[in-house]
Image (cartoon, grey):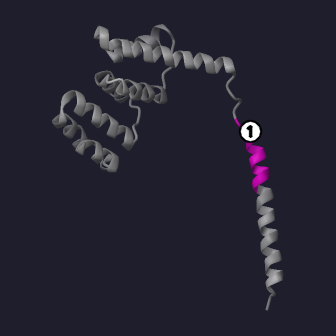
């Protein structure tokens, strides 16, 4: 029968070797990671995000179309717009009570076939209810796949 001290020595040695393996793996992944964006690139990206938000928030006053504005920014000014930028703009517009523009961003994303998470579908349901009414929100909810009918989407529908 093995002694407890001998067994503990084996376990401790195994733990130590797994720690060293993890340390080596962490050091290895640091050297293989993608180069970090320079400060100039970060400032440029921040300026683009700000300009996109400004253009979209101005649409409320002049009655423009979000989809056309985003296409124009991408085509004429060469901006690249990703899902994160669009969700952020939609959230900011919603906080400023620009519900119609926020909903149009979600519709633009749908045209581009950008996938939404269940919570993002919940926000979209909320925007539909605020702009088009509860029955339109229910219709959208009923058209969702079962995997998107989660607590967050039900909560937004019942709100």
Residue at 80% over, 64% down? 16
Tell me where residue 105 appears, x and y as whole percent: 36, 24
Prevailing SS of the magenta stretch: helix
Tell me where residue 114 appears, x and y as whole percent: 41, 32
Residue 64 in sight in this render: no
Whether residue 158 appears in magenta in the rendering, the answer is no
* 44 on left or right of 20: left
Helix, strand or loop at label 1? It is helix
- Outermost residue toward the left? 135
Crowding at dot 1, Cα within 10 Å, few <14 / some 14-19 / many 20+, comes out as: few
* 59 on left or right of 77: left
The magenta-colored residue range is 22-33
Mark 1 lies on residue: 32
Relative height, residue 97 to residue 10 (above, below): above
* 148 on left or right of 21: left
Tell me where residue 26 appears, x and y as whole percent: 74, 48
Tell me where residue 79 appears, x and y as whole percent: 51, 15
Where on the picture, by quarter, is residue 133? Answer: top left
Residue at 37% over, 24% down? 93
Relative height, residue 87 to residue 142 (above, below): above
Residue at 30% over, 48% down? 149
């Amino acid at each position: 029968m093995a002694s407890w001290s001998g067994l503990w020595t084996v376990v401790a040695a195994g733990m130590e070797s797994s720690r060293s393996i993890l340390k080596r793996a962490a050091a290895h992944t640091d050297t293989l990671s993608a180069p970090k964006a320079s400060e100039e690139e970060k400032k440029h990206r921040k300026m683009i995000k700000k300009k996109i938000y400004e253009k979209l928030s101005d649409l409320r006053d002049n009655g423009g179309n979000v989809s056309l504005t985003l296409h124009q920014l991408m085509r004429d000014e060469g901006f690249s717009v990703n899902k994160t930028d669009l969700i952020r703009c939609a959230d900011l517009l919603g906080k400023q009570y620009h519900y119609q523009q926020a909903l149009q961003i979600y519709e633009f994303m749908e045209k581009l076939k950008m996938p939404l998470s269940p919570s993002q579908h919940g926000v979209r349901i909320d925007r539909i209810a605020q702009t088009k009414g509860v029955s339109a929100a229910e219709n959208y909810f009923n058209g969702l796949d079962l995997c998107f009918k989660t607590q967050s989407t039900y909560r937004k529908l019942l709100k």
